[in-house]
Every structure is written in structure tokens, then in C-alpha cells.
Image (tube, rainbow, N blue to C red):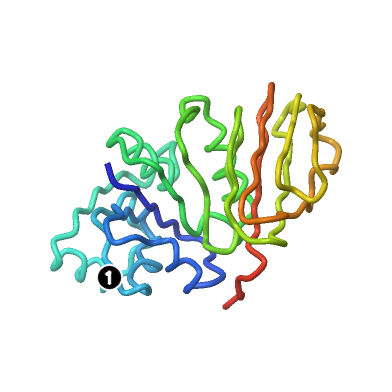
Amino acid sequence: MPRCLVFVNGHLPDREAARSLLRPDDFIIAADGGTRHILTLGLLPQIVIGDLDSLAESDRRRLEQAGVLLRRYPADKDETDLELALKYAVEANYRPIIIVAALGGRLDQTLGNLSMLADPALAGLDVRLDDGVEQAFFVRRQAQIRGRLGDVVSLIPWGVPAVGVTTEGLRWPLSGETLSPHKTRGISNELLSDTATIRIEEGLLLCVHRREGCRKVE
């Protein structure tokens, strides 16, 4: 199966950095208002999912004329539009899944988006939040980071201590150590080359990778 990119109606700090995430065969989902980012990039989604309350009428007409599938849900629902879109992507077996424009903007939405990725049902799947400038994902056992020398990498224990944390390719290495949720030891490490590896024995570790070469565009 091809990769899937899910665009959310959040902050997108650098349009060209987001464009660099795309590949020609990607399956593109818009979570309601995330449609605006896709259209700005000169693309069309294959499907729009959500209650569609953030979709401009002109954009709706454009999508319908292009034959884009619109899957509408009631406004009074328990899930966010992103949760519905992610469920669709997972059940359709798209791998990996990259969620775009889900970082920044509203703090409650950002925390909710991160918490959603901690779902045990996603264990074993490669699901990441990525806007081209920053990416965030959970390390459950082992993960690799690919970037450039000097990129910032922060490792944040999620809920409980992360035990047996070992890193390779970071400026300040860890070797079988424990990171506690109420401590900031894992913040602001740096890549020593284009690849780093992180391993943990127990717990859940949030990895935030910031690409320092990206330029912010408001």
C-alpha cells in the first residue's frame, strides 16, 4: 500500500517544507478544514472526512466537481475529525501514516493529537505528526530519526518513566538510562549526523525532531 498523508486544519509554519513531505503516489486525506492546506499546495485530496463545518462552500463545490469523496459525520460526535481520518487510514492499511498541520496553534488540539498517537492500537505502526519543520512520534521499543547535523531532538517520557533509554547518533548519548516525566533531561539534544537511533526497554517516549534548516513562513 502507498503512504497516507492526513492534512489537519491546524498551523502549517512552512508551506514548502510541507510540500517536501509529498510523494507522487501518496494517498491524501483531508480532515475537514485541512482541505485548505491541500488546495494551497495545488493538490486535491482523495477523500475529505469530518463534520465539514470548516470546509468553505466554494471549496466544497470545487471538490464535488472534481469527484472527490466527501464523508460527512454529525457535528455532535465523540471523535475529532482527525481521529476519524486516522481510523480510516489505519483500517485501509495505508503505511506509514503522516499527519500534517497537527502541531502548533491550539494547545488543546495539539495535546489531543499527540495523545491520540499514544493509543496502544497503533503499536507497531509508523504514525507521525509532521509539518515539514517538526515531526513528533512515539518510541515504544526502537525508532530511527533521519535528518541533518545539528537538528534538535527532544525525548519526553509520556505519563510514566521511560526505562532503559539508549541512543546512538546524538550529541549527548544515553546508555540504558531512565527518563522521568517530571524532569527535562531529554530536551534539546542534537543529531551528530543524518541518522540517530533510539531504544527503550519500558514505557513510552515522545520524540520531537526539529529540522533546523527549515524557514518559518507565516
Q: Position of residue 146 (x, y in %)?
A: 57, 52
Task: Report the front residue among 69 and 77.
Answer: 69
Q: Position of residue 74 (x, y in %)?
A: 32, 44
All told, the count of numbered labels is: 1
- The single residue placed furthest to the top in the displayed view is 202
Mark 1 lies on a secondary structure that is: helix
In the rendered image of this protein, does residue 106 appear above or below residue 128?
below
Q: Which residue occupies 63% across, 70% down?
A: 213
In the rendered image of this protein, does residue 114 appear above or below residue 146?
above
Q: Which residue occupies 34% across, 49% down?
A: 50
In the rendered image of this protein, does residue 56 appear above or below residue 8?
below
In the rendered image of this protein, does residue 86 appear above or below residue 131?
above
In this picture, residue 123 sits left or right of residue 191: left
Q: Position of residue 147 (x, y in %)?
A: 60, 57
Residue linked to disc 1:
59
In this picture, residue 21 sits left or right of residue 110: left
* Amino acid carrying mark 1 in the image: Asp
Mark 1 nearby-residue class (10 Å; few <14, some 14–19, many ≥20): some
Q: Which residue occupies 72% across, 38% down?
A: 167
Question: Can you say which quadrant of the picture contains the N terminus?
Answer: top left
Task: Report the front residue among 49 and 72.
Answer: 49
In this picture, residue 50 sits left or right of residue 21: left
Task: Report the front residue among 75 and 174.
Answer: 174
Query: Residue 23 falls in which quadrant of the image?
Result: bottom left
Q: Which residue occupies 15% across, 66% down?
A: 66
Q: Position of residue 20 (x, y in %)?
A: 44, 66
Question: Can you say which quadrant of the picture contains the C terminus?
Answer: bottom right
- The single residue placed furthest to the bottom in the displayed view is 217
